[in-house]
Structure formats: C-alpha cells, structure tokens
Amino acid sequence: MFFVDNKSNNLRDIDSMRISVGNLYHSIQLVKEKPPFLFIRWIPATMPRTWSVLEDIYKTNKTGIEKDAEEIEKVIAPTYEEMRNELIKQIESLNGDYEKITIVISEQGVKWHTEVERVINKMKNEITEIKEKHRDILEKHLNEIKQIEFLIKENVSTLKDLEESKDVTVIVNYRTKIKEFRKMPFKVHVTLPTFCPKPINRDQVCEMFGTLKPLVSTINEDGYTNELPEDSSGELIDIPDFINTFNTGYNNLRCVSFHTEEEIWTSAGSGIIIKSFTTSGNCMNTIKTKQGVYPDDIAVTSAGDLVYCDRISKTLNQVKDGKIEEIIVFQRWKPINLCVSSTGDLLVVLSYDDRTQSKVARYSGSIEKQAIQFDDEGNHLYSSSFSMKYIAENENLDICVADWGAGAVVVVNQDGKLRWRYTGLPSEAKKNPFKPRGITTNSQSQILTADCKNHCIHILDQDGQFLHYIENVKDPYGLCVDNHDNLYVAEWTGDVKVIKYLK
C-alpha cells in the first residue's frame, strides 16, 4: 500500500485496517512515521477501492503525463514555434513582397509611357510629313505665280517700248496677250490637319492598365498538423527504384522542369517546340518559341508560368496564358541557363559576347538585383565559354552551378561568396573526367548533378561531400525533383526517368 506525504508529495508505505460501522466496512490507513507525518485517511465503504487500483491509476496518470510532455515538447510547442517563425518571416518579407508589386506596376507604367510616347512621336512625324506636303503645294503655286509675274513684267516692258516706237511693222504685227493675263490661276487653299483628342475614360484606362486584386485573408484550419512526426530521415536508398519512364519524342532531350504531376515541361537541343507531359507520359501542351530557335534552358515559376532563355536573341521569355512575352533583352550578354529562386527571383547564367567572362545575375522582373562573378581574390568563379552552366538554388539559399566548361560544381552562398567546388571523385572512380550537366536540389539540401560522360548522377551534401551515385541512366542532362523528392532525369535519348532514391 502507498501514501502520499502532504509535505514532500512522496509515496510512503502504510498499513491498512478495516473497521465496521453499522453494517458497512470502512478502511483506515496509518502511516509508519513519527509525527508530524502521521496521517489517517478515511475511505467510506460507499467508495470501495483497493490500493492496487490506486496504484494502477497512479501508473496510468504517470504514463499520461509522460505522453503529454512528449506531445507538447515534440509536436505542440514546435508547431507554435513554426507558426511564430512563419509569421515573423511573412512580416519580414512584407516590404520586399510589396516592393515587387510596386516594381511591376512601375514597369507597367514605363510601358504605358513608352507606348504613349511612341504614339505621340508617330503623330508628330505624321504632322511633319503633312507640313512638308503642304509647303510643297504652296511653293509650287508660288513658283507658278512668280513665273506669270515675270511674263507680265516682260510684256509691260514690251508695251512701253511699242508706245514709243515709230516702227510700223512692229506695231502692225503686235498680238495682244491680255486675255492670257486676265485668266487668273486657281486659288490654292490647303486645309490644315486637325487633331481630335478623345476624352479620357478613367475607368477604361484603369481596366486596360491592369487590376489589383484585393487583399484576401483566409484561415486554414488544416494548415498545421498536430501529430507526432514520423521518422523521415531522408536516408539514401542503396539501390534506387526506377518508378517510371516516359518518352518525350525528342532525340536530344536537354531540360526538364517539374511544376505538378500534370505539368512537367521539357525541351531539346534542337527544334522550337517546348512540351508539357503528365507523369504517365501524356503530352498535354506544346509551346512554339517566339524567336523560332530552340530554348537554351527552361524553368517554371511558382504560379506555373513557363520561362525560357534564348542566347541567339539574348532574351528571357515568359509564357503566360499561352502568350510569349520578352521580359528581358540583354545587351552584350547571352543567357545560358536559368532557375527560379524561392523568392520568385530569376537566377540567370550569362556569358559575355566575346566569351571572356561569365556571371550569375539575380533578376526581379527585368531589374538586376545582384551579380555574382568573382571570388574574394578577384578570380573568375565560372568558366568563360558559352558551355552549359545549369543552375539551382538550394534549401539553404546557396546558389549551385554545374559548370561543364570548368568540370566542377561551383557553390556560393546567397551573398555570392564562394563556399566550395566539387570536381568529382578521384579519376580511378570513373572512366571519364567529371563534366557536370544538369543540377537540382532536394528538401534535404542535398545536391544532385548529372555526369553525362559517366552515365550517372552524383549526390552531394550541402557542404560538397560526396554521398552516393545513381547509376543506370544513359546520357543524363537536365534534372529536377518533384514535391516528394523523386528525381526526374532528362536523358539525351529522349526518355525521362523518374527515380526514388530516398527512403
């Protein structure tokens, strides 16, 4: 039997006894302690309860306390911490997010101003042309009048000479021209052009300029999971599982970009068609490039808009609602590869026209926010050629470039400071030198890069340490992962292989 000390809350051994009052039996427990710890507990017979039951309740509650503590520590408290951090992050990003909206509005304003200026200049040019035509008409008529005036003056001079002349022959042979002079030329009247301004309808202007969707605040009751997390260590599978393969119809497939299971975009090293597939391999959409040449690289924004770069026309293009718009036209730089960052910015690899330098530039809309080109010693971070330099942003915001020309994966932090380079394992590990093509990252901050020459994928941790190979891929180029970290591999032969490589 047990007793709870009122002062220390500790259990103490007790003896128990039963006494009879009337027809009922009652229990009395006595503590084997000296005063002041003597305690007598009266348990009425109407509440018959053995001390073994009390002990069971104690153990049950003790277990419940431990479970409550575990749930609070591992689930409830971290969930509130996640909510707090998410709200703080949202508040901290407010200025930046709204600045982006302001920039887009300003850019739209610049476009409108440009278009208005174009219309004004066009009309001014038309007015200049009309004025010159007007001038030509008047000057032509003026020349005709001057010519007639010259003839009149000559005739007047002749008449004066005849008036004083005594030469009978000349006077007899005189023929009057007065009828010709009396016949006046037509009076030229040229009407000036008029400009008819149309009234400005502000409602129509606002509608044409664009609309600002109102602020929407929603509460998602299912937004947070209040359950004990399952063990998801993200361990690598020794032998990856090839869960699907579909053919794109290309014979030189280069790029693959995942948006949803119903929208996986692909492009090739020749041809002007960009194709979208489902995970089952059904082609759902095709886009023809605006410039009529193959895209060098593709990416998809969080809103589902396709973005592609074209080094020939030096443009970055966005496909929105089926329409292609040039969002950036570069001067003296050629866009080679690109990706969409976690903030929605575009990270673009650019090579200079004369092939002497390359850099990574961050763009918000058409505005360059950051340029990454040199390390702390002033050395070039990337090879200078036009060779492919696939790019990806890691979960820790590192910027990862697979530099084929340099034979290295080059990783800088979000400020553009060099963190590390990976040039492959020792030469005896693989037959051919390491020449990376595609690159992507997963939720574990691991980096996956395609080794086309050795027909495999290298998996690295966020600090550049080699973890594992994925074999049995043929000429891998572009890479991407889906929401479950499954790897999509674009093989040069035209197949896309879907691989599960994490437990």
Image (tube, rainbow, N blue to C red):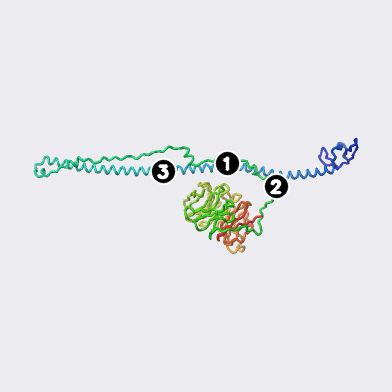
Disc 3: CA contacts within 10 A as few (<14), some (14-19) or many (>=20): few
Residue picked out by circle 2: 228
The type of residue carrying mark 2 is: Leu
Q: Nearer the viewer, mark 2 or mark 1?
A: 2
Q: Secondary structure at mark 3?
A: helix
> Which of the pair 211/418 is nearer the observer?
211
State the quadrant of the N terminus. Answer: top right
Asked if the residue at tag 1 contacts the one at tag 2, i.e. Cβ–Cβ closer than 8 Å, the answer is: no
Asked if the residue at tag 2 contacts the one at tag 3, i.e. Cβ–Cβ closer than 8 Å, the answer is: no
Q: Position of residue 210 (x, y in %)?
A: 50, 42
Q: Earlier in the sequence, mark 2 or mark 1?
A: 1
Question: In the displayed structure, does residue 117 sit left or right of residue 54?
Answer: left
Q: Quadrant of residue 430?
A: bottom right
The type of residue carrying mark 1 is: Leu
Residue found at x 53% / y 46% = 364
Q: Position of residue 208 (x, y in %)?
A: 48, 41
Q: Quadrant of residue 408?
A: bottom right
Q: Is residue 193 above or below residue 481?
A: above
- Give the Cα separation between the discs numbered 2 and 1: 32 Å
The type of residue carrying mark 3 is: Val
Q: Which mark is residue 30?
A: none
Residue 41 visible from this viewpoint: no
State the quadrant of the C terminus. Answer: bottom right
Q: Secondary structure at mark 2?
A: loop
Residue picked out by circle 3: 119
Q: Secondary structure at mark 1?
A: helix
Question: In the displayed structure, does residue 252 sit left or right of residue 49?
Answer: left
Residue picked out by circle 1: 94
Disc 1: CA contacts within 10 A as few (<14), some (14-19) or many (>=20): few
